[in-house]
Amino acid sequence: MNLIIEILISTFIIGAIYALGAAGLTIIFGVSGILNLAHGAIVVVASLVAWYCALQLNMGIYLGGLVGIAAAILTTYVLYFTVVIPLSRSRQLASEELPVFLFVSTLLFALILQGLLEWFFGATPVSTPAMIDGVVHIAGVTVPLNSLLIGVVAWAVIGALWLFISHTRMGKAMLAASMSPKGLAIVGYDIGRIHFLVWGLYGLLAGIAGVLLASFIGASSNVAINLTATSFTIVVLGGLGNVLGSLAAAYILGFLGTVTAFLISPSLREVPGLLLLIVVLYARPQGLFGRH
């Protein structure tokens, strides 16, 4: 019974982090149509910078975390201005070729970034200090308060994202841009400005996810590809551009990965999700929650 409780609690926490990271990736695809394969590397930037600032520069977990989030946003804009904009404006690429070039270019950016991270921080996994000390007992299972706080913070950010998109003018404009960019431009909105803000929002979400991840299970430069694969799997399973579908898919993968980690091996955490993705792509290519 205790094992079941441990699995459920771990699923809640890791699923919340997955959902937070995948929400940003889903928004980027919904608005700009880009599947960003540098996602995992950007998340790891936040994790490692937060660790370095918190422990090596003695800034503490909160200030170090803010610097980590800022680093993720900055990295996101480097990707946007050096890769996305130049390719999107290139007259040498046909419109049908652009998604492929962007897809490959974000992968190359990720590989370069991962190499730089390994050179500067090394490949040894690191963890940031707990945001809060103490434990709580749930149904006979001892759970660190820090772990529960991570899950709560992740869902609070997701809730704030929902409020922003649903109840602010700019949030509604972002949602409209995912439905009809031309229609939005006709009524006077600057699509370029909306894309700029969307990429910044994405960097913020990825940064928060990275800081939370570093405080929960730690991170290293070597996990960037695994994080990208997991987030990509979530986005596809949930249905491309479907935020609610991504949230549900995040918990499906979180549960499968947690069960695998507890019962078999943590090194195989991502395998069940990838196998499920293969099955879904054959049976339901639009994703579990996508429309025909």
Image (spheres, grey):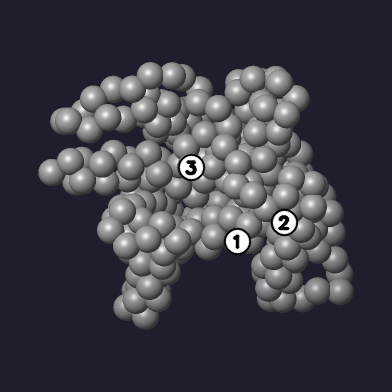
Taking 175 as reference, is 152 left or right? left
Residue 214 vertical placement versus 169 (above, below):
below
Label located before the other in sequence (1 or 2): 2
Mark-to-mark CA distance, 1 and 2: 9 Å
Between label 2 and label 3, give the one nearer the viewer. 3
Residue 84 vertical placement versus 218 (above, below):
below
CA neighbours of label 1 inside 10 A, class few (<14), some (14 to 19), many (20+): many
- The local secondary structure at tag 2 comes to helix
- Residue drawn at x 60%, y 23% as measured from the top left: 61
The residue closer to the viewer here, 246 or 213, is 213
Look at label 3 and name its amino acid.
Ile
CA neighbours of label 3 inside 10 A, class few (<14), some (14 to 19), many (20+): few
- Residue drawn at x 67%, y 40% as measured from the top left: 48
- The residue to which callout 2 is attached is 114
- The residue to which callout 1 is attached is 225
Residue 145 seen in the figure? yes
Task: Kindly indicate whether the residue at mark 3 contacts the one at mark 2 (C-beta within 8 angstroms).
Answer: no
Label located before the other in sequence (1 or 3): 3
Quadrant hosting residue 166: top left
Taking 268 as reference, is 81 left or right? right
Task: Kindly indicate whether the residue at mark 2 contacts the one at mark 1 (C-beta within 8 angstroms).
Answer: yes
Query: Which residue, as the protein is rendered here, is positioned at the far left?
Result: 1
- The local secondary structure at tag 3 comes to loop
- Residue drawn at x 74%, y 45% as measured from the top left: 121
Quarter of the picture holding the N terminus: top left
Label located before the other in sequence (2 or 3): 2
- Residue 13: x and y in percent read 37, 39
Mark-to-mark CA distance, 2 and 3: 19 Å
Taking 225 as reference, is 75 left or right? right
Quadrant hosting residue 109: bottom right
In the rendered structure, find residue 217 and report the number of the disc placed on it.
Answer: 3
Look at label 2 and name its amino acid.
Gln
